Image (cartoon, rainbow, N blue to C red):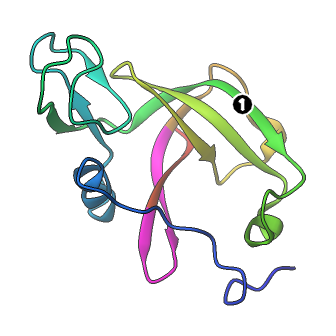
Amino acid sequence: MSNPAVNPKPVPEINAHSKPYWDGAQRGELMIQRCRGTGKPFMYARCWSPFDFSPDPIWEKASGLGTVFSYTVVYQPPYAAFKADCPFVMAIIQLDEGPQMMSNVLNCDPESVRIGMKVKVCFETRGDGFKIPQFEPA
């Protein structure tokens, strides 16, 4: 078993564009952006809309609900810090608001995960209390 003190799981590097997303996660909220021009929601954090290139998209709290769009079960850890988690589920989650995001599905048997499965956001704490949005069965 890996020692978390020796092999800590990584935490993201936060930049000006992603800071509202990570600030929300620390509050236990899943944040998404919405285009000012078209009103369409999107993920990942950017300083402009991918739909009409309008600047300064709006940040808003998402419902935290979604569906497993696709997934794989990981048996071989990508890094030593993830060895104790194997096997684990890496999934693409279709948020109820529309955007898709990659995440883990936690708190269930990896073999029970299915495409179309309803999930809700949960938060994994890493390092000195840093929260990472993940999902679990709804």
Task: Count the numbered circles shown.
Answer: 1
Q: Position of residue 131 (x, y in %)?
A: 42, 65
Rendered position, 32 above or below 83: above
Q: Secondary structure at mark 1?
A: strand
Q: Which quadrant of the rendered structure holds the N terminus?
A: bottom right
Q: Which residues are magenta?
A: 120-131
76 and 66: which is toward the camera: 76
The answer to which image quadrant residue 54 occupies is top left
Rendered position, 47 above or below 97: below
Q: Residue shown at 78%/48% (left/top)?
A: 109
Q: Is residue 64 left or right of residue 33?
A: right
Q: Position of residue 45 (x, y in %)?
A: 32, 39
Rendered position, 70 above or below 63: above
9 and 119: which is toward the camera: 9
Residue at the extreme bottom: 5
Q: Residue shown at 10%/20% (left/top)?
A: 36
Rendered position, 112 above or below 26: above
Query: Is the magenta region chiefly helix, strand or loop?
Result: strand
The answer to which image quadrant residue 80 occupies is bottom right
Q: Identify the residue under disc 1.
A: 71
* Residue 129 magenta: yes
Amino acid type assigned to the residue bearing label 1 in the image: Tyr
Q: Is residue 111 left or right of residue 127?
A: right
Q: Position of residue 26 (x, y in %)?
A: 31, 65
The answer to which image quadrant residue 14 occupies is bottom left
Q: Residues within 10 Å of mark 1 (few under 14, many from 20)?
A: some
Q: Residue shown at 77%/63% (left/top)?
A: 85
Q: Position of residue 6 (x, y in %)?
A: 72, 88
120 and 19: which is toward the camera: 19
* Residue 108 magenta: no
Q: Is residue 34 left or right of residue 115?
A: left
Q: Is residue 87 left or right of residue 21?
A: right
